């Protein structure tokens, strides 16, 4: 038997084995985005507070009781919380910290897909952009739509992340799951971005600067949300638009105009093409009903 074959899975996982519940949670959260970490940590603390016992002693009854306590949450939030606990328990079991994965048999509640409600029409989107008078904010809104980047990716952009590419330009973002991707930017949007650059900027200076010194000069996601909400209200749109709606609009409008689905997937940084495919079904162009003989 070779030395390689004599190494067990337990030996491989030993350096990362958790020493406590808190340590397990820290290992499980490692590498996730700050926003995801905050949300998942809150879900875990809520479960631990409800169960009132170490994770190793948690039972299926504890999970079912926790699920029942979440009825006051929106369906999507309830689904996320239960998914988080199931993921944590499965992770702890794989590491050998938990003897049993009691979350495996817990069934997640069905969630209605409301993606179609969060896709702005091209008319609404262009009205939002055209009515924004502030050059920085207009460039920000236009880039959200033209690139489909997440708000965290937009806020992290610095000048070293922008490179010319022929008549166009491109941005490089470090996205979800630790994946780096480059996105080509159309000439009009590229000119908007370049016009924001101050004389002799540092490569690490943020592209979208904040007026608040406490942020280190970088615009924060909450500030971007405020910019988006004001722009939407100015355009007469009453629903609570968020920066992520621009990402939804990018995907939906690009596919409607014939963009290959694999190109949209690469631009948005979707790990699975099935995620991108949701946009094809959210706003269908045809229905089998059109082939029926109707009165």
Image (cartoon, helix red, strand yellow):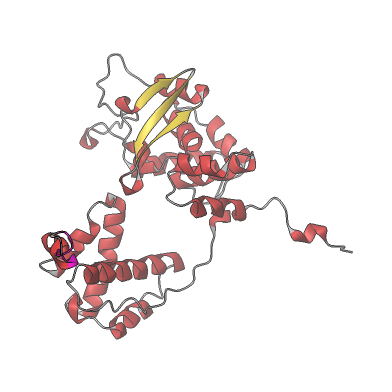
Residue at the (64%, 38%) spot, across then down? 257
Residue at the (26%, 34%) spot, across then down? 212
Any part of residue 233 in sight:
no
Residue 67: quarter of image: bottom left
Residue at the (60%, 51%) spot, across then down? 280
Q: Is residue 6 magenta?
A: yes
Residue at the (12%, 69%) spot, across then down? 20
Q: Is residue 255 magenta?
A: no
Can you say whether 82 is above or below 37 in the image?
below
Can you say whether 154 is above or below 71 in the image?
above
Depth check: give the residue in front, 288 or 94: 94
Q: Main secondary structure of the magenta part?
A: loop
Give x and y (percent) for residue 84. Answer: 32, 66
Any part of residue 249 in sight:
yes
Residue situated furthest front in the rendering: 1
Give x and y (percent) for residue 247. Answer: 48, 44
Give x and y (percent) for residue 277. Answer: 55, 52
Q: Quarter of the image containing the C terminus?
A: bottom right
Residue situated furthest right in the rendering: 295
Give x and y (percent) for residue 93. Answer: 23, 72
Span colored in magenta: 4-9
Residue 201: quarter of image: top left
């Amino acid at each position: 038997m070779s030395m390689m074959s004599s190494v067990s899975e337990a030996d491989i996982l030993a350096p990362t084995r958790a020493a406590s519940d808190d340590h397990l949670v820290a290992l499980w959260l490692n590498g996730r985005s700050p926003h995801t970490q905050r949300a998942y940590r809150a879900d875990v603390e809520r479960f631990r507070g409800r169960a009132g016992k170490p994770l190793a002693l948690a039972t299926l009854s504890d999970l079912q009781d926790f699920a029942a306590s979440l009825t006051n949450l929106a369906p999507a939030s309830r689904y996320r919380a239960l998914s988080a606990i199931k993921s944590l328990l499965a992770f702890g079991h794989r590491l050998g910290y938990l003897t049993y994965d009691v979350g495996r048999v817990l069934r997640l509640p069905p969630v209605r897909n409301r993606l179609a409600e969060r896709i702005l029409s091209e008319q609404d989107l262009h009205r939002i952009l055209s009515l924004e008078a502030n050059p920085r904010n207009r460039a920000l809104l236009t880039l959200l739509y033209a690139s489909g980047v997440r708000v965290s990716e937009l806020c992290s952009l610095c000048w070293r992340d922008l490179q010319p590419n022929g008549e166009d330009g491109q941005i490089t973002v470090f996205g979800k799951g630790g994946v780096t991707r480059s996105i080509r930017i159309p000439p009009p949007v590229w000119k908007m971005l370049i016009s924001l650059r101050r004389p002799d900027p540092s490569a690490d200076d943020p592209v979208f600067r904040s007026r608040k010194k406490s942020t280190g000069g970088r615009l924060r996601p909450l500030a971007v949300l405020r910019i988006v909400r004001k722009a939407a209200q100015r355009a007469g749109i009453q629903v609570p638009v968020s920066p992520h709606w621009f990402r939804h609009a990018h995907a939906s409008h690009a596919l409607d105009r014939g963009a290959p689905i694999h190109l949209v997937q690469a631009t948005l940084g979707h790990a699975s093409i099935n995620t991108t495919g949701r946009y094809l079904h959210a706003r269908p162009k045809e229905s089998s009903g059109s082939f029926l003989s109707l009165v």
